[in-house]
Amino acid sequence: MKNYLLLCGGVGGAKLALGFKEILSPENLGIVVNTGDDFTHLNLKICPDLDTVMYTLSGESDVSKGWGRKNETWNMLSALSKLDGETWFQLGDKDLATHIHRTKLLQSGYSLQEATSILSKLFNLPDFIYPMSNESVETYVQTKNRLLSFQEYFVKLQCKPPVTDFVFKGLDAAEFNHSIDLDAFEEIVICPSNPFVSINPMLQLNKLQQHLINHPEKVTVISPIVNLNSLKGPTAKMMTELGQDVNVQSIAKFYKNYSKRIFIDSSDQNELTTITHMGFEVCLADLIMNNFQSKVNLAKTIVDHLEES
Ligand code: FO1
């Protein structure tokens, strides 16, 4: 069995990561998670994508929302609201415990990697979830009038302002997580996460970027665009605002320096020839993951193909 490294954002990526967890032994799997969405809120360090992956893989997530914990209660938030506190970012009581514990670990001197390992163990998960960096990289969204912090854009303004660009602050001082030995992975799978704000922050980290550019044959993209729309979240809206066509070709263009293989949905078969001419091996599969079995099936289809290639 080959070793697989997933590059993963939040909700959409976590679905595929769950499928991979079901079919691979933990020693054959690594999951690198975007931390560009992280921020400090109410004096707590919040890592939305790390938590979404951790909750999803441990069976603790609120599946209907995709983020946060299942069977959540909201006593803190409603009490905070009565005190006229800041409640635009919804923190459930159980979720809050994770942020409090992580913040305490970081303040005690643990790195984000170490804090993630400790939390993973507490959620009965193997030690296979890796923050992309121990240093802070913050995603900002440039809109016509203002540069917005990611959560302000995503949650407070519900992705409404049209985007013109993205800015990643902190890259100069950030390194790709040194706990990850890229050479140990024969296959790298880019999950169907938002290319601009979930995957691109990782691709800006020099060591990962160079590795992908030098080994595009081991990189497989799973398209986040199916049937001319996003699988999840604002990917399609962002593509339109950036002047791109909302189709799989635009995704292939985005990743063309990093990858030689792309999985597209069977409904997008009409784009197969064009993308093949761009130099990709194009594989067809059912990319819509709306239940547990479809997540496992997609992971299995990808692994079966890559084991033979
Ligand atoms: N997303 C929302 O749309 N609204 C929220 O209030 C919200 C709270 C929240 C709390 C903890 C957490 O780990 C994630 C949370 N998310 C919320 C999701 C998160 O902001 C986004 O899904 C990601 O940052 C995008 O990948």
Image (spheres, rainbow, N blue to C red):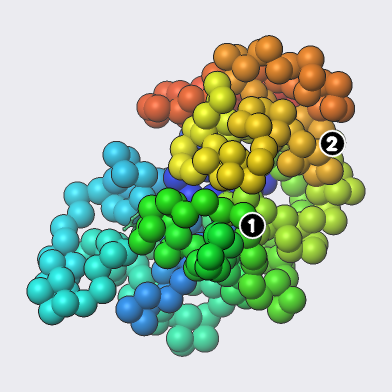
Q: Give the residue type at disc 1.
A: Asp
Which residue in the protein does label 1 denote? 165
Q: Is residue 202 left or right of residue 66?
A: right
Q: Quadrant of residue 173?
A: bottom right
Please tell me whether mark 1 sits on a helix, a strand or a loop: strand
Mark 2 vs mark 1: in front? 1
Q: Is residue 78 visible?
A: yes
From the top left corner, tell me how far across and down residue 103 is, in percent.
Answer: 41, 78
From the top left corner, tell me how far across and down residue 193 is, in percent.
Answer: 56, 43
What quarter of the picture does the C terminus occupy?
top right
Give the residue furthest to the front: 145
Quadrant containing ligand 1 reads: bottom left
From the top left corner, tell me how far across and down residue 88 is, in percent.
Answer: 28, 65
Q: Nearer the viewer, residue 106 or 284?
A: 284
Please tell me whether mark 2 sits on a helix, a strand or a loop: helix
Which sits earlier in the primary sequence, circle 2 or circle 1? Answer: 1
Check mark 1 vs ligand 1: CB closer than 8 Å? yes or no.
no
- Rounded to the nearest angstrom, the CA distance separating label 2 from label 1 is 29 Å
* Residue shown at 72% from the left, 55% from the top: 203
* Residue shown at 70% from the left, 72% from the top: 171
Q: Is residue 187 above or below residue 290?
A: below
Which numbered disc covers residue 217?
Answer: 2
Q: Quadrant of residue 113?
A: bottom right
Q: Is residue 272 left or right of residue 95?
A: right
* Residue shown at 56% from the left, 53% from the top: 163
Tag count: 2
* Residue shown at 58% from the left, 34% from the top: 224
Q: Is residue 109 above or below residue 168?
A: below
What quarter of the picture does the N terminus occupy?
top right
